[in-house]
Amino acid sequence: MQLNKNNLCAHRGYSSCYPENTMVAFQAVHDLGLNHIECDLSLLGDGTVVIHHDGEFGRTVALRGRLLDYSWPDITGADAGSHKDGRYAHVGIPRLDELLDWASKNQMSLNLELKVHAQEGDELVSNTLSILRNFPDCDIMFSSFHMDIMERLSLSSTSYPCAPLFDHFDAACLPFINKIGAGAIHLNGHHLTKDSVGFIKNQNLILRCYTINQASIAHDLLEWGCDAIISDLPSEILDISTFKRLV
């Protein structure tokens, strides 16, 4: 299998060149001709669902402290871009509804990873599903390292596909995957072998591998049977100039 726009997903947007989890990083993916984005959902203290990876500000945003100690008016206009380059000092933190509106208009598929930093998991799921009701045409899937979140989603009345995230594959996780009816699993591709990929595929699971930034590793994983690659470097592991002529 060759890399193409259907099996390559941009991790936190085009995060190698643009500020991660921001609208400029997402727009850059669209501009490359790709249509799959992975991003992170976190909750503010007032219940606002935002696109942000960490439980605290500071690494990518010019604020300090826990997200749960802020409300949306507190962070409106916060600098979420200059950590990457001063040209992006104007770039802010997106809300989930902002991302969904853009994705719906541009026919982009979203892999939404739910991040739980304290005890806010139930509220994060509830608020996320409530927002999604306003965007019924969005192509959405959920992933998370938090198995209670995966189970909570499986018990909801929604039909969004879910994929548990694991660093290492262990066959002991299969009963849980079957219990929640997940048809896919997301794994650290650097810990996989041809045999382990074969075993997973024999369980009739869709396998997506993160975070692969070398073309040789991506091609090996696809050759072994991996269904999709999640990467910070979409243009580097794929010849975009050739790719855009072929699609």
Image: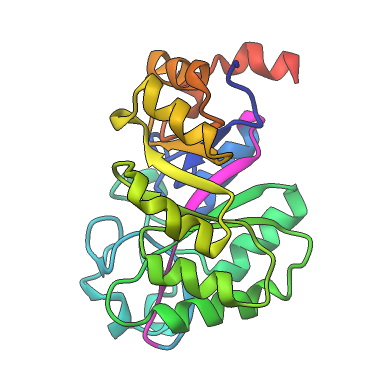
Residue 35 belongs to magenta span? yes
Do we see residue 21 in this rendering? no
What residue do we see at 58% from left, 59% from top?
181
Number of numbered markers? 0
Q: In terms of depth relative to the viewer, which is nearer, 29 or 81? A: 29
- Of 197 and 213, nearer the camera is 197
Whether residue 142 appears in magenta in the rendering, the answer is no
Q: Residue at x 39, y 79 (%)?
A: 44
Tell me which segment is drawn in magenta: 32-45
Residue 126 visible in the current orientation: yes
Percent position of residue 202, x then y: 53, 33
Image spot of residue 65 (x, y percent) = 21, 75
Give x and y (percent) for residue 208. Answer: 49, 38
The quarter of the rendered structure image containing the C terminus is top right
Q: Nearer the viewer, residue 80 or 137?
A: 137
**Residue 186, relative to residue 191: is it above or below?**
below
User: Is 128 located above or below residue 2 in the figure?
Assistant: below
Task: Determine whether 184 is above or below 124 in the image.
Answer: above
Asked where in the image residue 66 lies, by quadrant, the reply is bottom left
Q: Position of residue 98 (x, y in %)?
A: 61, 66
Viewed as shown, does residue 14 lie left or right of 243?
Answer: left
Q: Residue at x 56, y 55 (%)?
A: 182
Residue occupying image coordinates x 47% and y 26%: 198
Q: Which corner quadrant of the image does residue 217 belong to? A: top left
